[in-house]
Image: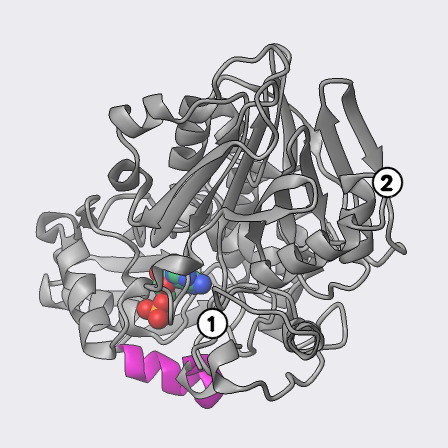
């Protein structure tokens, strides 16, 4: 059965003054589109209306494809959550789109989740044995099930969320809409980002600060690891229902996922990427005429490299902005072709030049191999690859989409073999020490680079094939 890996964005808003929130969710999801382009959705309810009355629109596609003026106008209500979703396989199943909406003892509950649990199969097994049925193959549905069950004997939805969280292991940034409350919860390691903002009397919980700016809200603070926030007409409440763990924010958020204008857990994504480029220039200097980055993910680190080295920064590629991330293409041939569809070389800028080409990461090596070939084909004399993260060698269990071990080029080949395969004149990666400096020593999970994870990863239980995972 397909294994789902969720790399998603979440957004939740509550307006105690009763104004409709659908348009704000729409703009928030637009700002989070880079976190998931496969499906999106929103669920909205009116806290003054009858309990259980809600509207949910979700489908495969981009935010601009799923929502339009007509359906947005029809989504009435002052409390709502939204989700953008990206997964590799099994993803086209429309039932996996979020928010997930369930009817339970207190009415309607909607949930949007970013991150991957590592004990889903154990939890699912327990539920199946007790007669549960599932409509999706997502771990988010498992969370919803436990929430509904806990709510039967708890005093508040917060208590049900807390009791559920005690069963979860892995990465989760959750936004939950109960009939009268907006709830946010972050796993105790703080693996996935979640922040709190405010616009007039409305509170917002979302994956990245860029989504707050897009709706004219002010950033208040990051939700702390293990923190549960409940927002209702009587205000905002914070609690820490779980045992404290060692913080481990996902380093890949800074390297690649998050938008350049976001700041997460006190660190600006832009500053982190510039710092990585500067560190690369110090650890892997080279004599060259031009520093360029792979648009868009490699550009800030390329700028940092140029600033530190004194070599001029310039554009070497034109990017067709209307094409999604190449990574989502399922087959290798499609991936190879999509690099050419997405990027074309600016011959006049690179001809006869010694070029430093910077990108944030190499996964399979497809992008780099093609770009080096394009640069050399356009007359570049030398191409020196610099990567603003360490070699990507280990799986991620928490929601970063990483192909299986032997597809990871750094897992199978030595540095020089990789350089040769990519056709480059030199190759340099960021060191693990420089990786820590890039985020000013913030405690991070860098398991994809060093194979050390912040928690024990249980062996997944064999489930009947129709259950997924
Ligand atoms: P590859 O061509 O397989 O070596 O992939 C490297 C390219 O994919 C780089 O340009 C990265 O910016 C991008 N990338 C790295 N990790 C991911 C990810 N988890 N999801 C989507 N794109 C990624």
Disc 1 crowd rating (10 Å Cα; few below 14, some 14-19, many 20+) is some
Q: Is residue 45 left or right of residue 89?
A: right
Q: Main secondary structure of the magenta part?
A: helix
The answer to whether residue 90 of the structure is visible from this angle is: yes
Do callouts 1 and 2 mark residues in contact (Cβ within 8 Å)? no
> Residue 402 — which label?
1
Q: Residue at x 19, y 45 (%)?
A: 322
* Image coords of residue 3 (percent x, y): 47, 75
State the colouring used for the structure image: one colour
406 magenta-colored:
no
Using the image as rendered, state which of residue 195 and residue 358 is in the foreground. Answer: 195
Extreme right residue here?
A: 243
Which mark identifies residue 155? Answer: 2
Q: Please say whether residue 414 is one of the residues in the magenta stretch.
A: yes
How many numbered marks does the figure carry?
A: 2
Q: Give the alpha-carbon distance from disc 1 to disc 2, as whole Å.
A: 41 Å
Q: Is residue 254 above or below residue 362?
A: above
- In the rendered structure, which disc, 1 or 2, sits on the residue that comes first in sequence? 2
Stretch of the chain drawn in magenta? 408-422
Q: Secondary structure at mark 1?
A: loop
């Amino acid at each position: 059965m397909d294994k789902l890996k969720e790399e998603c964005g979440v957004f939740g808003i509550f307006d105690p003054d009763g104004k409709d929130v659908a348009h704000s969710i729409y703009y928030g999801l637009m700002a989070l589109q880079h976190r998931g382009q496969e499906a999106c959705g929103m669920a909205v309810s009116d806290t003054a209306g009858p309990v259980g009355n809600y509207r949910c629109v979700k489908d495969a596609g981009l935010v601009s494809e799923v929502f339009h003026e007509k359906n947005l106008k029809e989504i009435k209500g002052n409390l709502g959550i939204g989700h953008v979703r990206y997964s590799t396989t099994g993803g086209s199943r429309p039932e996996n789109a979020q928010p997930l909406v369930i009817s339970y003892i207190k009415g309607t509950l909607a949930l949007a989740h970013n991150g991957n649990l590592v004990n889903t199969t154990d939890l699912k097994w327990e539920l199946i044995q007790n007669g549960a049925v599932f409509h999706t193959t997502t771990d988010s549905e498992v969370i919803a099930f436990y929430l509904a069950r806990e709510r039967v004997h708890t005093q508040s939805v917060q208590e049900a969320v807390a009791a559920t969280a005690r069963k979860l292991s892995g990465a989760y940034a959750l936004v939950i809409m109960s009939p009268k409350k907006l709830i946010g919860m972050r796993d105790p390691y703080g693996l996935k980002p979640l922040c709190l903002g405010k616009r007039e009397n409305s509170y917002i919980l979302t994956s990245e600060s860029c989504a707050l700016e897009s709706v004219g809200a002010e950033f208040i603070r990051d939700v702390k690891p293990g923190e549960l926030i409940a927002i209702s007409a009587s205000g905002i409440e914070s609690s820490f229902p779980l045992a404290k763990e060692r913080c481990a924010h996902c380093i890949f958020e800074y390297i690649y996922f998050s938008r350049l204008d976001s700041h997460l857990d006190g660190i600006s994504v832009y500053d982190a990427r510039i710092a990585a480029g500067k560190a690369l220039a110090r650890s892997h200097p080279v004599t060259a005429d031009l520093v360029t980055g792979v648009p868009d993910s490699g550009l800030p680190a390329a700028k940092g490299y140029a600033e530190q080295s004194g070599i001029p920064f310039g554009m070497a590629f034109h990017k067709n902005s209307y094409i999604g991330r190449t990574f989502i293409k399922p087959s290798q041939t499609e991936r190879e072709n999509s690099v050419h569809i997405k990027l074309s070389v600016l011959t006049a800028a690179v001809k006869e030049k010694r070029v430093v080409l910077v990108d944030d990461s190499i996964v399979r090596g497809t992008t780099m191999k093609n770009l080096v070939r394009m640069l050399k084909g356009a007359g570049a004399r030398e191409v020196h690859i610099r990567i603003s993260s360490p070699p990507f060698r280990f799986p991620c269990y928490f929601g970063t989409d990483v192909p299986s071990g032997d597809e990871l080029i750094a897992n199978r080949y030595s540095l020089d073999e990789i350089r040769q395969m990519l056709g480059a004149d030199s190759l340099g990666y960021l060191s693990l020490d420089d990786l820590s400096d890039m985020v000013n020593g913030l405690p991070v999970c860098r398991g994809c680079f060093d194979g050390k994870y912040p928690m024990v990863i249980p062996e997944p239980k064999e489930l009947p094939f129709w259950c997924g995972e």
